[in-house]
Image (cartoon, coloured by chain):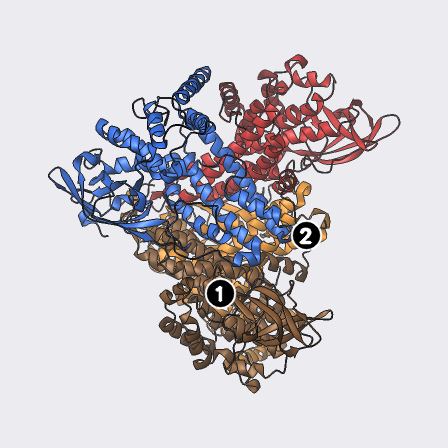
Chain colours: A brown, B red, C blue, D orange
Amino acid sequence: MSDLNLLTTDVEADLRSVVRDLLADRCDPAAVTALYDGDRSIVAELWKVLAADLGLAGLLVPEERGGDGATAVEAAAVLEELGRAVAPVPFLTSAVVATTVLLDSDSELLAALAANERTAALVVPLSAAPHGALPALRVDADGRLTGTVTSVAGALEADVLLVPAAAGDGLAVYAVAAADAVVAPVVSLDMTRQLADVTLAGATGELVLADGEGAVRRALAAGAALLAAEQVGVARWCLQTTIDYLKERRQFGRAVGGFQALKHRLADLFADVESADAAARYAAVTLAAGDPDAEIAAAVAQAYCGDVAVKAAEEAVQLHAGIGMTWEHPLHLYLKRAKADQIALGTPGAHRARLADLIDLPAAAS
Amino acid sequence: MSDLNLLTTDVEADLRSVVRDLLADRCDPAAVTALYDGDRSIVAELWKVLAADLGLAGLLVPEERGGDGATAVEAAAVLEELGRAVAPVPFLTSAVVATTVLLDSDSELLAALAANERTAALVVPLSAAPHGALPALRVDADGRLTGTVTSVAGALEADVLLVPAAAGDGLAVYAVAAADAVVAPVVSLDMTRQLADVTLAGATGELVLADGEGAVRRALAAGAALLAAEQVGVARWCLQTTIDYLKERRQFGRAVGGFQALKHRLADLFADVESADAAARYAAVTLAAGDPDAEIAAAVAQAYCGDVAVKAAEEAVQLHAGIGMTWEHPLHLYLKRAKADQIALGTPGAHRARLADLIDLPAAAS
Amino acid sequence: MADETTQRAELRRRVADFLAAHDPAATERSAFLQARYDAGLAWVYFPPGHGGSGLPRALQAEVDRLFAEAGAPDNKPESNGIGLGMAAPTILRFGTEEQKERFLRPLWTGEEVWCQLFSEPGAGSDLAAVATRAVRDGDSWVVNGQKVWTSGAHNAAFAILVARTDPDLPKHQGITYFLCPMTDPGVDVRPLRQITGEAEFNEVFLTDVRIPDTQRLGAEGEGWKVSNATLNNERVSIGGGAVARESGMVGVVSRTWREHPELRTPELHDRLLRLWVDAEVARVTGRRLRQKLALGQPGPEGSAAKLTFARLAQQLSGLELELLGEAGLRYSDWTMVRPDKVDFTGRDAGYRYLRAKGNSIEGGTSEILRNIIAERVLGLPAEPRVDKDIPWKELRK
Amino acid sequence: MADETTQRAELRRRVADFLAAHDPAATERSAFLQARYDAGLAWVYFPPGHGGSGLPRALQAEVDRLFAEAGAPDNKPESNGIGLGMAAPTILRFGTEEQKERFLRPLWTGEEVWCQLFSEPGAGSDLAAVATRAVRDGDSWVVNGQKVWTSGAHNAAFAILVARTDPDLPKHQGITYFLCPMTDPGVDVRPLRQITGEAEFNEVFLTDVRIPDTQRLGAEGEGWKVSNATLNNERVSIGGGAVARESGMVGVVSRTWREHPELRTPELHDRLLRLWVDAEVARVTGRRLRQKLALGQPGPEGSAAKLTFARLAQQLSGLELELLGEAGLRYSDWTMVRPDKVDFTGRDAGYRYLRAKGNSIEGGTSEILRNIIAERVLGLPAEPRVDKDIPWKELRK
């Protein structure tokens, strides 16, 4: 790792600041909260601005296929900002995961994603880990797909679905128009990334990858590595918001942030968030560089950052006390995102178990 | 459990106060510390006073066999006080574990233990869990015993050794004079309960139990249940000593104990120690009553109290800071006892694993 | 002990006599409850004349069991937790004879439900910072201000209320305690939605609410002392709940574990076992606490028990979501409702996780409880106080 | 970056030239080191004339590597950690030209080893409470007092020392920083045995020790500021150690795990994996910190890194004893010795466990580091201070 730069680059800092300013303008917590009462009006509008106007839809698509040719490092910067704003957009699902699947295919769909003409979602449960079990729909001799996959993220925002289907011992990937599937919204713990149950009943699709298991797993691995940056964003917002509040909030004639027990907890949390930041960055940098350490780095980042984001959100609720329990304060949006993110793409425990193989720390023989 | 009294009885309070006063007089920390430099002079003297003068050697022996006929509740009270003073005496090994083995036998040895004419030790490693693997020495046709058992507690203080030996599929128990064995002292992490490696090379012994595995396991289980009380004693001393010190110690112009971060840690530790006390007491009370819950209670107490004692000792060192790291301050005696006790008679993890069976929370199928 | 045995036998006899005279099947519910109160068989540890018989608190479970076994109607304690747990003991201790006469009987029978008007947006942990003003006007007080975190306010007939009566005094000295009619037209109750989606609590706006001086509890300026007595009762009742093994959150998660072998992993197994052990230890510790309380040896474990209860509820419910995995990503319903009662372990795992976050805030935050343990139990120095001797009105808010 | 590449190439050329002129195999050790110092190739980020070349700190590893590869003798940095890590940067920053001239060269070559006389029995975390007195006497100072936790005092030629020079001023203002000769007959060094059995540190009793005023570092009364600069260096160097994966305690415990399949259990497995992840994250965090420092962007992670280092060392070494089980109950040797150097991961598991307890105390307790992070990094209010403006001599001790 000696040559990998772990510091923020100028390119990334510019991108980050553009995204942050835009979200400050266009991603109002009240509009995000309205998602919980079924008002999804913010989603399409915000995604249009981010995907098309800022060009984020094609961030990871090579220039020769119509994209920006940026790397995982820039995608991580975007995800950190999206996490910081609990932004309800399909960047992770379409511009990272579905895009990475399509990088292995020569489908024209990739260019359509890059141009934000289409938005895609890989049809797996959000909880699917890169190295875990994958769904596989039945495909008949006429190429018609049948089956249901539950708890799919990004499906509600997608107009095209990437569907894994059984193909001999392996997995093929088909692109199916969302209009040809039943996409049933799910009441989700995190309504800022609302899930859907996707059912296909004999729908036809375009075969995009005949032998696609590797691509699907790579896409989930990239998603997991970069989800860590989103988790850092969530954690940073929670930490900073809590610090700001505790400097203002007075009880017992003093700023609450001056009470040493809280200071020490915030100091520990700060150390955790800084560490999570470094772990997420290392995962992004090794992924971007195609470094052999990328797989370990991703597992480490997922084993670490998911718990830190949950801890930051939980500490934020506790230290805000009453006001942190209200619907009115945006904190609950972060708590729900953090908890859902902890389960997304494999729990920390699942990533630790995977890591045991990668680093030769085997489990007890039973 | 509705009828079991969890409060201190008068009998127990009296016993406790006699033992505590005696230890305050006779168990000077400097003399205990000298054990680490090989000066074991305190051991025999202190044990004589406790075992003979106070009659603690026969506490658990029924009156009709020459003892006090007291219960596990009184033994727990004694052990808590011994823990509080890190007293280097073989009460646990001889008066609890070895005595419990002999309760199943009609050997005269029990009366000799009760009268403090003899002191015994069960020849198993101190780390042996009640439900774990047990050593079994070879016994030849002439009844001669051969083999080595390492890290045996109480052997240095014993004049008679209770030796488990292979007997068909089961385990017999022989009593062997310590003089007929090689008892090699071990440099131990906790020199206040110094271990020894015991080697028998064809020694002859008295058969005290032909079918002794059950008795040995019951003895270790009683030891484990009551070790929890010792751990509570260690934890209480650490907590109280730290509180007392932090009320006196001044830094930054204030008593250090007034700093809120430390106050909150001590409040949490207090809650842990009170809980450990209740857990240890419930284990002793159910053991004394022959309650069907005794096995679960012992596993719970061992899973809980060992970690609390270690935490209390570690917090005490940290909050004493520099002085807590010195040889001069008795705290290190407690840290070493706490850490050794955590491993003794099964680690907390081993007791949790055992508990999984008892409470029907099975492990993952692998 | 012999004494308690005698008391217990005598109590059984009295209950049997009462049931013989008031057939539960044939007596109208509220008449039955009123008669039970008048017979001193309501809260038996209360004094005679106020629903009790001056017996040890330990006998209450016995009498409740006897009535339940006879099929008698109960006073729906879950619908009047604040009244029974907090208002009643405070009225008993600080009330005038007339106040006890007027309020305790309908409180116990459930005819009058109570709520609590203590917390304010600017006075959470620092309850003595209450800014709600009560101004004397003849034989009444006129109250203006805003309260929050009031459960059951929309069903309540009365509230226990603290308000500032003298802003010229230091903050702890100018507070008075009132029994406030919730039916006054100046009381405006608005649901306060919380992170679970539902509105279990309310905000209460008080505009020129009139309270007769006869409904002042304790002396003018004594409200701090009175409210502390109330809060101590709250903490004992919150911390001292469950008794059966695997009660509460640990039971819920253990059942999930047993019913879903396919979800089990080694790491979750050890975490669950650790929490199971902690929960069992907390249960035994609570049992010991109740034995102490029954003997009149109140220990410091009340605050410690609440700390542990909250931590366990949070860790267990968080673990359950990880265990459930995909199913943990789904929620039952975000629709805003006003639930009739709180059920920490009810609904789905997501609800339990979110609701448990309140356990370390409501009824005294865990931070305040740690201060209490450190200062009152361990005798460590108090926090430096800068606001103790300054007139309330001059404090920076 | 282009600039650094040029600098790096130029540096390689200079080292090659130096090695051509000074054959490591043929040059006497101290002559070689002195020549390296004089060539500005000692600590290359120091200024020219003081052993350096004013280069970025990032290049130090490169020059050390080049010399090591050539088989050149090094300056035994492990034997003079206080000198190189703390005294040298402080002398460079606050010293007069004469002081830099006199002290830096023999310090770097290892001819003069340094130790630190800061802590006292009554001044641990509260370093500004030092009671050791220095009284002016002509061109010298006469020092009396007691210091503790001094490592290497018995081998040291000099010490960095803080002493109180004006007790009439508030505590932070009356302190002065000195370079104290350890060869003075008034210096009495006594080993301080610690919980591991050995005496890694010393108590140092100072009786009428004379220090020339030319060995005062910084102005009279400026000792607080100077010592803080020293301590910041200490924390960076403590926190910024390991670089290779599985360096330090995590590597030791991982090896034990790999070598002993028979000791493995599921619960220990997950605990080890958690700590392995934490250690790896700490390693990456440290790597980023060093990249920041190399670019002159010192971040706040120095204190955080030390916190994490201590926590991991303690948790891992505690875990190892549980993993070892029976073997964890045995210890190597309690005999009192004075070790030449500290090895946190050496000896047996019991030693590692006990020694690691010091990691959160020495060089700033974890509690002090949390205060520093909270106040200086997060900008939270400082602790209420009661001793700030009162003359030292009037403070309650």
Is residue A82 toward the left or the right of residue B286 in the image? left
Which residue carries the number 2 mark? D257
Q: In front: mark 2 or mark 1?
A: 1
Which residue carries the number 1 mark? A194
Q: Is residue D63 visible?
A: no
Q: CA distance from mark 2 to mark 1?
A: 42 Å
Asked if D241 appears above or below B179 in the picture, the reply is below
The number of callouts visible is 2
Question: Which quarter of the figure is the C terminus of chain D placed in?
Answer: top left
Image coordinates of residue D15 in percent, x first then y, are 58, 76
Image coordinates of residue D239 in percent, x first then y, are 51, 59
Q: Amino acid at mark 1?
A: Gln
Could you tell me which secondary element the residue under label 1 belongs to? loop
Is residue C123 toward the left or the right of residue B321 in the image? left
Q: Residues within 10 Å of mark 2 (few under 14, many from 20)?
A: many
Q: Quadrant of residue A324?
A: bottom left
The residue lying at 59 percent from left, 84 percent from top is A108
